[in-house]
Image (cartoon, grey):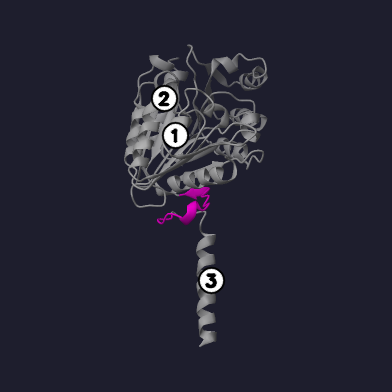
Amino acid sequence: MRRRLSVFFLFGLVLVLLFAGCAKTSDFQTIPSNDAVFTVQGTSGSFSTFYNQPPNTKGIDNEVVKFINSATSSVDIAIYNINRQVIVSALVAKKQSGVPVRMVTEADYYNKSTYKPFYDQLENAGITVVPDIGTALMHDKFIVVDGQKVLTGSYNYTDSQTTKDKNMIIEIASSPLASYYLQEFNQMFVYKKFHGSKTHISGSCYVDGSLVQVYFSPKVGALTAMENAINSANSNIWFDIFTFTADNISAAMINRYNSGVSVKGTFDNWQAGSRYSEYLPMHNAGIAVKKDTYSGFLHEKIMAIDAYTTSDPIGIIGSFNWTASADSSNDENLLIIHKSFVANSIRGQCVYVYNNWAQ
């Protein structure tokens, strides 16, 4: 009898280890107990997520290079600033191979002496770089390859963003989604329309059967869309955020917390010290918020809603800080993705930061 029990025990242990080994790719439907760390980085269908871990790059720059290298017909890139040489070199090489490469960027960095040599490399290779016009920011960070795939997130293509600041990127293979990004890109590159002069673009499509909503600031109601997503939460909300000053977003999370939803997250330590930050209002409301302990910035702008549940799990990501200026002035992009893999991935990262890099 004892031997039979031992056999059953070993069989059960093998099953546990087997499923544990699948944790990085499976879309779990049970919330991990005790806020355990389940970092889901990788690929599920048309979606892939990547994170750096300063000072470890975790190859986030090389992933951007791979994405650029995959292009066969076009590379269109909107980036706030760039000085990461491996990415500059990949763009130059792609242009030299005969693939058209186009770029829009923030004028403040295009004209900055320390960044100019990198923009010069691009332009000397025949790549047209269009700086923005106006006082608001061209704050996007996205690439469209072949009109079929999109890479976006919080990551600027710089040395400090690679090795010092905490960032995330997501890749989505979807021609309908890519078409939205190309419409936005062409407004800036072709028609030289930036900020408030643009036609306001937002829309949605289904990728692998999952709803993806996209918003391009300014003045498309991105903050309201975020608020609506938060209001849908039934179980849990997790977030990492660089700049968070939007009253309606904190009010929505406080409301869900008061209704019994678990809400936890990490603020960038420097930005949390601003008198406009929502850190203190949320802390004073009893929400378990922390400040990061990275030597650089916690630059992510991510949220997971109802991860590891069947209650419409949502992942939120983009260049979009949770501020009035992001909503009403800057060129930004925000994705609200109704897919368990993305929500679980973001939640896993937020839990990791909260437990290991925050206080």
Left or right: 116 in relation to 51: right
How far apart are labels 3 and 2 at the CA level?
52 Å
Residue drawn 37% across the image and 41% down it: 257
Asked whether residue 30 is in view, the answer is yes
Task: Point out the residue furthest to the top here.
Answer: 134
* Residue found at x 41% / y 40%: 174
Q: Can I make out residue 46 in this image? A: no
**Which residue position is annotated with label 2?**
184
Q: Which of 314 and 37 is in front in this view?
A: 37
The residue where tag 3 is placed is: 13
Whole-Å distance between the Cαs marked 2 and 1?
Answer: 40 Å
Q: Callout 2, which amino acid?
A: Glu
Quadrant in the rendering for residue 299? top right
Q: Which amino acid does label 1 sit on?
A: Asn
Residue pointed to by mark 1: 284
Q: Give the range drawn in magenta.
A: 28-44
